[in-house]
Image (cartoon, coloured by chain):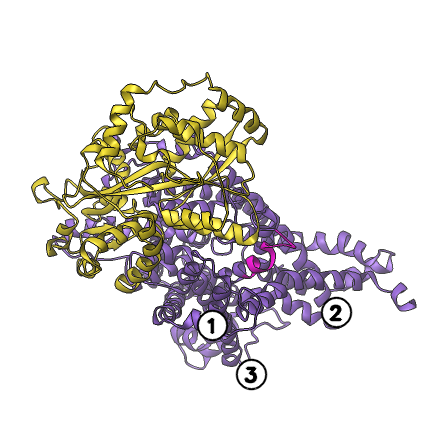
Amino acid sequence: MPILTKRHFLAGATGSILLPRATQAADLAPHEQALYDAAKKEGELTWYSGQLQAETGEAVGKAFTARYPGIKVNVVRSTSQVAYQRLSQDMQAGVALCDMFSSTDYGHYNLLKREGKLLPYRPKNADGMIPAARDPDPDHMFQVFYIGLYLLAYNTKLVAEADAPKSWKDLLDPRWKGKLAVGHPGYSGAIGVMGVVLSKLYGWSYFDALEKNKPQIGRSADDPVTLMNAGERAVGMGVSLAAPLLSQSRGNPLKIVYPTDGTLAVYSPSAIPKNAPHPNVAKLFMEFAAGPGYAEATRPFFIMPLRPEASPPDGARPFAEVKTIQATPAEIEDGVPDIKEKWRDTFGV
Amino acid sequence: MRRLRNLDPASLVWIALVAVLLLLVAFPMAKLLLVSLHTRSGAFTFGNYLAAYGRARYVDSLVNSLLLASETAAISTVFAVPMAWAVSRTDIPGKAAIWATVLGAFILPPYLGAIGWILLAGPNSGVINQVWRFATGATDPLVNVYTFHGLACVMAFQSFPLIFIFVKSALDLVSSEMEDAANILGANTWVATWKVTLPLVWPSIVGGAIVVFLESVALFGTPAIIGIPARINTATTQLWQFFEYPVRVEVAAAYAMPLLLIALVAIGAQRLMLHRRGFVSQTGKGGERRPIVLGHWRWLAIGYCGFVAAVAVAMPALVLAEASFARAWGRGLSPSNLTLANYRFLLFEHETALATIWNTIWFSAASASFAVVLALLVAYIVARKLVRFAGALAFLATAPFVIPGIVMAIGFYASFAAPPFSLYGTAAIVVLAFTARFLPIAYANAAAAMGTLHPEMEEAGRILGLSRLGTIRRITIPLLKRSLLGGWLIVFIVATRELSAAIFLVGPKTRTMAVLLYDLSEAGNFEVLAALGGILLLVTMALVGIGMKLLGRDFMLRRA
């Protein structure tokens, strides 16, 4: 996986001028038409997803069905670790149920790839994506359709803009005692990556100090958004960019903060299990997810598009203007299981 | 050969029943034990037990569960017994409303009640605390759901109906003459109640409390939703962790074994406590039952029942209803905050929500039907002593009672998920697990019903030339129809709300509403969750309404 750098996004941005716009809805490119013909016979896709929220996932499914009539998408939304747990249970029972597996934990894909459990496919439409997302795996065992940005957010009724935390480090200030909320690495893949990256930056002592502020721990990275909407907690830690922006657009008093010590960028792959019951639909879905239709369908839900021609959602900065922090796939694969254990020791759950 | 040819059809049914019960009950548990004692590659080991109990945190989780379940059982008893006494023995007005409370608490799925209480008693945003701060100017919250006691209270709100039903039906059988005797000997009403009436129903109080204890140990949804933010690990959330990657069924099995032991110990303790004491209150002579006149005390009784109704049903239901129509629940009741979007999303934009509603209904109906048929056959054979060792059948039919739901689910996963059965992700495995899990309820119901039926009516049928099975079909079933329907309805209701037995067994196509609610709760989207809960409640209430129309409102108590 290429590490996300400004250069990649800038390259993508210039690429947008040179690349012709990809296929329009309804008139399918030949490679899509061929897949569509095969996929129609299979009729549906079961998508285990820990990346997008339930509502966003359903909207993607609807957009897919609108573009490829006759094919239904069953979204099984959960947190990434639970999605992986379900997939592992399926595999252990020797049953094939899942067609598309999307999580926020890169380690899942390295492991599944080594075990030979993935079906290789390189969507043609990926040529039109930003370089950072174009070819995550040399063997094409998985693709990246979602690069999650995870940051801070706060309730504007409870916290004045001037007082709002500016960085991850700020959250350790005692004035946030009893006011923070965060997800759980045992459930959320992104929070696991957050644990890896923040302990790389500041050491595990960061979390020991965080515990002194008694954050409320949920499961999903986006759990804090609900708590902030309700006024139960004032500041959300490690929430996705999309969830607070969507909530804000619906009238909730939220504001996002790009931390000065770096916004967490989580490369989130998607893969087709080798024994997927509907492999052609899955391949077609990959074409869709790499193409412009996916970016259009997810834009109203404030997902950062990975196509250079699409502008970032309202209220979000372009990738190139975000200072990101991230972990390598190896760091994630080795680090997340360790983070889960340490987290449970430090926070008690 | 002659013996075989002369084999009574009843024996064939008996053999078939034994096979079914062994497959549904004994096999998954035996498998669980075997799995717990072997490595993945099949070698014998105790290593799984070391892995399961080798860390202080894992042991603490189990201890937490036991403490939590004890407190839940205690609070439930305090809720249920006075209410049951008031409804059964006194002239308290509004008995129908009290019944509605109990039924409401019974129908409300535990995880939904948990979310209702998060909305009510969140330390900062909870409705109760907001009102409290507004009224008193205090800064500290009045109640905090994210605590050990908060969790225990919420669990008790959901489980007290079990004790109520047990105790009320026992109290109904105590005739006033016993109290009269005490009165004559100088005891006033309160002393008579305390020293005579309640001790007579002691077995049902203990029995109910033990059922609540066992159910609480096995509860998954509420501990996950409230326990994680409250920093309380329980045995069930720990079992869930063993299913995290890499899935360690064998460690989960080892971890579950003590839960089974605890269940057995609890039942044994019950036996011991009630050992050799006489509790016969029902005799051949019909006793008279006069309600105790409460007088001014009725206000206290009404207040108490009203309090339980409010905390267990009315308050969570109201706040959930509000949330289901809200854009953001924290913004309170205002026209700009009202929306139908949550319902619209589930009914028209969510590809699988409707399918999960349908799954829930038909899985529950199928399980209820299987359980009632199995239970009736077993109860018939036991009551009519058709074969030797009929007691063994009764044992198998009641054994799941002591198996926590989540343990049963892991047993089913270990037994039926992989080849040769390959049932994982199918409707069959969920229906079978529900059937086995709720068989004891159906059996208790069927056995009680059979107990009321004198064999002479069937004998008349046999004399007039009907076969054994013909007698059952034409005489027994018609006579028991109403109580069997009542049993069916109870199993149906508990199946619609069941989460812990479903969570490890469902696939993407077989998710039930309970599982979908759990999945949605991960992202904390309480508004949509509340709407889904609202739909589930409407469906259940419609079916319960039909049931009550057919059976009368006390179908949960009917003994014949």
In the rendered picture of this protein, how many numbered marks are placed on residues? 3
Quick one: B533 or B199, which is closer to the camera?
A: B533
Colour in which chain B is drawn: purple
The residue at the far top in this view is A27
Q: CA distance from mark 3 to mark 1?
A: 38 Å
On residue B385, the disc is 2
Colour in which chain A is drawn: yellow
Which numbered disc flags the more N-terminal residue, 3 or 2?
3
User: For the residues tagged 3 and 1, is the chain the same?
Assistant: yes
Q: Secondary structure at mark 1?
A: helix
* Residue A9 picture location, percent across and down: 25, 32
> Which residues, given as a range, are shown in magenta?
B411-422
- Residue at which label 3 appears: B276
Q: Secondary structure at mark 3?
A: loop
Contact (Cβ within 8 Å) of mark 3 with mark 1: no
Quick one: A243 or B511, which is closer to the camera?
A: A243
